[in-house]
């Protein structure tokens, strides 16, 4: 497929000989805006402002989404329903036209040809034949003016390159019209004028050639007050004298301005043997940074691909002169050594009484060279001095790779992070001869362990090719590192651990202590958590904050900015290196683990009993399971205390089964030694988690084990939680409403457990038939969740409120909430949220008689809940599919779905979902009547014997 923005905005496919214009003006404008910044994200707000300047309608965001969806349909009419396709990506803040994802963009082809090396005449001719005014009638749009100028500049350079080839071969006559047009567009571009003069002369038009020279001289003097350059004067003289030898010399190379021949590949900087993968957007960012700054520092951890990106940029731009130096390879890493290395690269000799640095700067100025300085962290001050002097001249380009930014006013910083998961997988599989013969799940596990670091992925691919994925993964898990082949690479790149150790070695002793402590975390943590747990001697809060900032700046710790705070995560490769360094003296790993477990326990206890606490459980939720394991491994009786105090958190995360397993393990381990009151307390809260996990029979057994005496001993918030769940489970919805209403008053702070109770309260009101009150309860939940930044609870409230509105017949309102709920769940990326949102959409679509849409949403929900388990989806989606099958006169398909659904209720003791309860009963009765008891029983029994995955295959097929 080809997208055309040179001339009319249009699209063509391989099977179509002519381009199809893009329909409405707003569609064309959106495509033009995305093409103008291909590979880079444009915020939704920026697109809306561009389409409706100053006065966007209230429906602008929805309209924009519709336009984008229609463009996707134009590009890929056969893409799967509701997928984004491969051309326009949806990002967290807006949209991005993907670069090179099986399609071509004519303006991008032109820009790349203008800067790439060794582009042939045929390619240049094809690009010139496709030339048209950028963005046609849209070119004057304020947001497209800069791109239009950039593309016109690229066109001029392509014309120049094509003329160079033709003139160097002795031709030129057939380019006269092309060069005339180019000069009329760029009347002050001396190189084009020189080429036109030679082309006219070789066509036999000496008078025209002389006239072109004189017109240019007059233009320069009259318009700009400048004299033409010496080359145009020399050319005019040669044309006048018919000095063809001199003209041939000018045509063969002098037109390039006397630039030096391309230098050989950098002598000291090692090029990766692997093609760059997943860095198109980063190359675009680097290109933007270079346009606005004479020096750019690419900052990232060792092995992230900083050098590869810098050299790829050099190759893409096609500069004539490159000087590249790896500071780590210098015998002495100081400022004079760096200047000498650059002089060697540039061929600048030392002269008596002449400052070598000044000679290098002068050479860079004259040749417009690109300087690449690698591994600057080895001598950051010396590199800063060199770059400061080079950048002050503002000629040439200086690219620096480092783990920290330079303290140079003229130098900008571009941070380079790890590859995204899909790109990381692609990098590994692209290096395997037969990727299909390796277990995909094990390959995914291997890639996940390597943090998206290209060096680690390159090493892993080499090892998988030699050892296979199973042994490579086992080696990584056993040793904590992978060894690279002995191919002459620097020592710091010989293994994944060596790369991380190189980065760690640059830290001061205090920051190393902090990193070793932070490496105890397996998941993410925030600044408050880091200060609370780890600020003991030799660290205080200030040292933790400053050290964490340093680790982030070196990309040893990754920062993720959320709506209300930032979270941090130590890279797995860095964690393995710092924890595996036996030579590092001081505190033990076991000591750090117990600090972490005790902090989690302290926080859970405070939240359970509404006591003051520095942290909330939500801030340490990622370490809950780890804290259980640490205390269990130590045989510490506090494991049972943690099990009871943290129990109510598991349902808020959708991790009920995992939480129940940990609680039951603690009950078994400490049954003989725990105080009876504590044991009954934990059994009680375990019953609530069991209920949330969908195991109603286990819930009853745990309640029996706790007994009435245990219930009386419970603190009010735990007792009311259990009473509400027991009432709801037995169908006493009014009693459940009363219990949850009182329970909310026992949670004054908007913590995770309170949000959970607010949701349960809304559900109890809905099941009790109190629809208006239920809607208001869900809205209260949403307002509270928004106030504390709980995106999960916001999404939850949207989908459940939508179903209540559908039940009361308010379908317009229901659809609006469904759309918001689907979008919120997609942003979260949580499978349970996604499948529940799809169920809500199916319910609303079915109530709206949109049967095709309802069935698709229901099937999508079943597929989404194959992993992980979601009890709400499994009780609702099959009944919707059954109802639609019956309405389409397919009672056999309905019987299969009903058989699985009824068996599921029987196995788990679950009650039907209120949104589909009456429908399920009606569909079962009608299906049984239409098929007859025997045939219905046979098909329902077959459905009951299916796994959920098998049921999905039957229903979807």
Image (cartoon, helix red, strand yellow):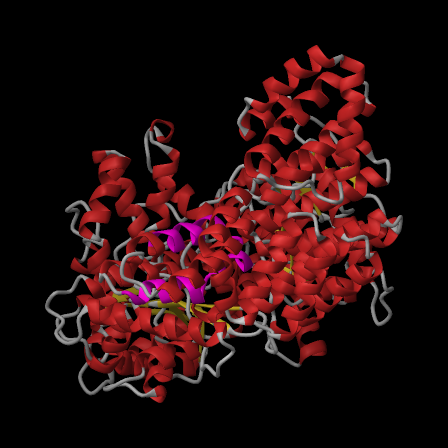
The answer to whether 22 is drawn above or below residue 157 in the figure is above
The answer to whether 216 is drawn above or below residue 799 in the figure is below
Q: Magenta segment: does it hold 570?
A: no
At which x and y percent is residue 109?
58, 47
The answer to whether 543 is drawn above or below residue 776 in the figure is below
At which x and y percent is residue 536?
27, 84
Left or right: 734, with 561 as reference point:
right
Quadrant of the rendered image containing residue 197? bottom right
Name the residue: 52% across, 47% down: 700
The answer to whether 210 is drawn above or below residue 296 in the figure is above
At which x and y percent is residue 350?
19, 77
Looking at the figure, which quarter contains the N terminus?
top right
Taking the view exactly as shown, the residue that stands out farthest to the left is 583
Of 768 and 563, nearer the camera is 768
Q: Main secondary structure of the magenta part?
A: helix
Of 205 and 116, nearer the camera is 116
Q: Is residue 180 visible?
A: no
Left or right: 648, with 785 as reference point:
left
Q: Is residue 893 visible?
A: yes
Of 31 and 398, nearer the camera is 31
Q: Magenta segment: does it hold 642?
A: yes
Quadrant of the rendered image containing residue 492? bottom left
Left or right: 748, with 593 as reference point:
right
Name the residue: 61% across, 70% down: 789
Name the residue: 66% across, 26% down: 897
Left or right: 348, with 778 as reference point:
left
Name the residue: 62% across, 66% down: 755
The tally of labels here is 0
Looking at the figure, which quarter contains the C terminus?
top right
Bounds of the magenta segment = 637-665
At which x and y percent is residue 237?
55, 63
């Amino acid at each position: 497929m080809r997208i055309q923005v040179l001339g009319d905005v249009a699209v063509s496919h391989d099977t179509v000989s002519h381009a199809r214009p893009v329909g409405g003006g707003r569609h064309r404008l959106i495509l033009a805006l995305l093409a103008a910044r291909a590979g880079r994200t444009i915020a939704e707000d920026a697109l809306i402002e561009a389409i409706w300047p100053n006065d966007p309608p209230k429906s602008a965001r929805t309209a924009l989404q519709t336009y984008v969806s229609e463009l996707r349909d134009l590009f890929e009419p056969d893409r799967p329903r509701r997928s984004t396709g491969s051309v326009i990506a949806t990002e967290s803040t807006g949209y991005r036209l993907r670069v090179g994802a099986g399609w071509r963009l004519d303006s991008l082809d032109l820009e790349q040809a203008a800067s790439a090396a060794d582009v042939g005449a045929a390619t240049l001719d094809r690009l010139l034949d496709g030339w048209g005014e950028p963005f046609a009638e849209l070119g004057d749009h304020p947001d497209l003016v800069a791109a239009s100028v950039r593309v016109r500049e690229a066109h001029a350079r392509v014309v120049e390159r094509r003329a160079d080839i033709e003139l160097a071969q002795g031709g030129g006559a057939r380019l006269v019209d092309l060069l005339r047009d180019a000069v009329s567009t760029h009347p002050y571009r001396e190189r084009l004028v020189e080429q036109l003069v030679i082309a006219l002369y070789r066509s036999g038009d000496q008078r025209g050639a002389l006239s072109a020279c004189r017109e240019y001289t007059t233009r320069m003097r009259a318009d700009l007050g400048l004299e033409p350059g010496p080359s145009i004067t020399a050319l005019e003289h040669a044309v006048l004298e018919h000095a063809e030898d001199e003209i041939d010399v000018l045509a063969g190379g002098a037109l390039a301005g006397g630039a030096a021949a391309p230098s050989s590949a950098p002598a000291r900087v090692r090029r990766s043997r692997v093609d760059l993968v997943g860095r198109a957007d980063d190359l675009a960012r680097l290109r933007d940074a270079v346009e606005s700054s004479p020096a750019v520092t690419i900052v990232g951890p060792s092995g992230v691909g900083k050098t590869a990106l810098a050299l790829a940029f050099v190759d893409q731009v096609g500069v004539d002169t490159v000087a590249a130096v790896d500071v780590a390879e210098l015998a002495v890493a100081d400022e004079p050594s760096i200047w000498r290395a650059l002089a060697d690269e540039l061929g600048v000799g030392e002269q008596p009484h002449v400052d070598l640095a000044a000679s290098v700067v002068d050479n860079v100025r004259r040749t417009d060279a690109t300087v690449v300085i690698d591994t600057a962290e080895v001598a950051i001050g010396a590199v800063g001095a060199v770059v400061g002097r080079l950048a002050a001249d503002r000629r040439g380009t200086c690219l620096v790779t480092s783990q920290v930014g330079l303290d140079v006013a003229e130098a900008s910083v571009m941070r380079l992070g790890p590859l995204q998961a899909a790109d990381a997988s692609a990098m590994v599989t692209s290096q395997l001869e037969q990727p299909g013969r390796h277990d995909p799940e094990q390959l995914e596990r291997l890639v996940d362990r390597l943090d998206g670091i290209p060096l680690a992925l390159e090493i892993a691919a080499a090892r998988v090719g030699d050892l296979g994925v199973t042994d490579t993964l086992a080696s990584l898990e056993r040793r904590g590192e992978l060894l690279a082949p002995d191919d002459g690479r620097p020592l710091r790149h010989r293994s994944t651990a060596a790369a991380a150790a190189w980065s760690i070695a640059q830290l001061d002793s205090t920051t190393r202590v902090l990193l070793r402590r932070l490496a105890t975390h397996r998941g993410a943590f925030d600044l408050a958590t880091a200060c609370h747990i780890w600020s003991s001697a030799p660290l205080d809060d200030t040292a933790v904050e400053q050290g964490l900032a340093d680790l982030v700046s070196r990309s040893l710790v990754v920062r993720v900015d959320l709506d209300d705070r930032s979270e941090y995560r130590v890279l797995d490769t860095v964690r393995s290196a710092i924890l595996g360094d036996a030579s590092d003296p001081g505190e033990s790993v076991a000591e750090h683990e117990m600090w972490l477990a005790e902090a989690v326990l302290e926080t859970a206890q405070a939240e359970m009993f509404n006591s003051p606490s520095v942290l909330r459980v939500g801030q340490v939720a990622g370490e809950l399971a780890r804290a259980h394991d640490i205390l269990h491994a130590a045989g510490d009786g506090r494991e049972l205390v943690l099990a009871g105090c943290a129990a109510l958190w598991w349902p808020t995360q959708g991790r009920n089964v995992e939480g129940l397993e940990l609680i039951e393990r603690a009950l078994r381990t400490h049954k003989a030694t725990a105080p009876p009151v504590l044991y009954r307390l934990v059994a009680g809260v375990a019953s609530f988690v069991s209920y949330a996990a969908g195991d109603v029979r286990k819930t009853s057994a745990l309640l029996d084990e706790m007994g009435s005496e245990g219930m009386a001993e419970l603190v009010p918030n735990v007792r009311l939680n259990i009473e509400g769940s027991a009432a709801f489970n037995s169908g006493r919805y009014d009693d459940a409403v009363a219990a949850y209403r009182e329970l909310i008053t026992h949670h004054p702070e908007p913590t995770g457990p309170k949000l959970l109770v607010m949701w349960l309260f809304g559900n109890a009101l809905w099941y009790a038939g109190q629809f208006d009150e239920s809607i208001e309860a869900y809205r209260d939940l949403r307002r509270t969740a928004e106030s504390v930044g709980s995106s999960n609870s916001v999404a939850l409230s949207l989908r459940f409120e939508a179903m209540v509105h559908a039940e009361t017949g308010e379908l317009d309102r229901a659809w609006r909430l469904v759309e918001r709920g689907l979008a919120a769940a997609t942003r979260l990326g949580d499978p349970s949220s996604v499948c529940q949102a799809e169920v809500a959409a199916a319910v609303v679509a079915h109530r709206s008689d949109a049967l095709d849409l309802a069935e698709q949403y229901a099937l999508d929900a079943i597929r989404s809940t194959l992993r992980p388990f979601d009890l709400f989806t499994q009780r609702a989606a099959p009944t919707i599919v059954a109802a639609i099958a019956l309405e389409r006169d397919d009672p056999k398909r309905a019987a299969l779905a009903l058989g699985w659904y009824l068996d599921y209720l029987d196995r788990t003791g679950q009650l039907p979902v209120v949104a589909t309860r009456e429908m399920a009963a009606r569909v079962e009765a009608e299906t049984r009547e239409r098929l007859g008891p025997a045939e219905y029983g046979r098909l329902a029994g077959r459905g009951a014997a299916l796994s959920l995955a098998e049921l999905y295959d039957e229903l979807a097929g």
